[in-house]
Image (cartoon, grey):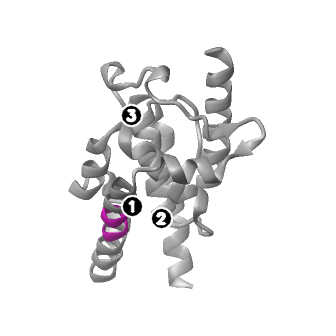
Amino acid sequence: MKKILIFIVLLVLAGVYIFFSNNKIMDNNDKLDDKDITWEEITANGVNEELLIKNVDKDILTEVSTELQALVAEAYEEERENPEILITEGWARVFDYDRFKKVIDIGKPAMKPLYLIIYKSPNRGEYEYLCAYALYKISGYDFEWATTDEFMMKFNEYVVNMEVSNK
C-alpha cells in the first residue's frame, strides 16, 4: 500500500512539474528548428519500427539508457533511505541531477534513441517518463502532456503535422 501511495505521489508531482514548467523548458535559442531532424520513421500510418531501429545510433542508445536507468535506481535508493524526500523535494528533483543533464547535453543525437526506448518498452514507469521528458526537453516541441502514453501520442501527432506543413 505504501509503494502504491508513493507511486501516485510521484506521478502527481511529475505532472504538476511539467504543467507549470511547460513553457519554461527551453530558451528560444535552444529550441530546434523543425528542419534540424527528420522523422521519416513516423507517419500518419504509424511508426516504421525497422527504419527507426536502423536510424538509431547504438552507442548513444547505450549511453542514454545506462544514464537514465542508473538515475532511476539512484532515486529509488535515495527514497528508500529517506522517504520524506518525496514530500520535501518531490520526484521531479531528478530533472536537476547530473545524469539527466548529461542526457540532455547530448542534444539532438539522443532524440531517436529516447524515442525508441519509450516506443519499445512494455512499461510506463519512471524510466520511460524520464525518457519522454528528456525527448520533450531536447526537441523543443510545444504541446502539453501528463503521461508517457499521452506524450507518445502527441509527439507523433506533432511530427506528422510538422512533416505535412514542411512539404
Residue 55 at what x, y percent from top left?
Answer: 49, 46
**Mark 3 residue type:** Ile
Circle 3 SS class:
loop
Q: Of the residues tagged 2 and 1, which is closer to the observer?
A: 2
Residue assigned mark 2: 126
**Which quadrant would the C terminus be assigned to in this image?**
top right
Find residue 96 and report its horizontal and vertical position in percent: 27, 51
Whole-number angstrom distance, CA of label 3 to CA of label 2: 19 Å
Q: How many marks?
A: 3
Q: Secondary structure at mark 2?
A: helix
Whether label 2 touches label 1, CB < 8 Å: yes
Mark found first going from the N terminus, 1 or 3: 3
Disc 1 is placed on an element classified as: helix
| Cα separation between marks 2 and 1 | 9 Å
**Residue span colored magenta:** 65-70
Residue 66 highlighted magenta (yes or no): yes
| Position of the N terminus by quadrant | bottom right
Q: Main secondary structure of the magenta part?
A: helix
Left or right: residue 161 compared with residue 18: right
Check residue 55 for magenta coloring: no
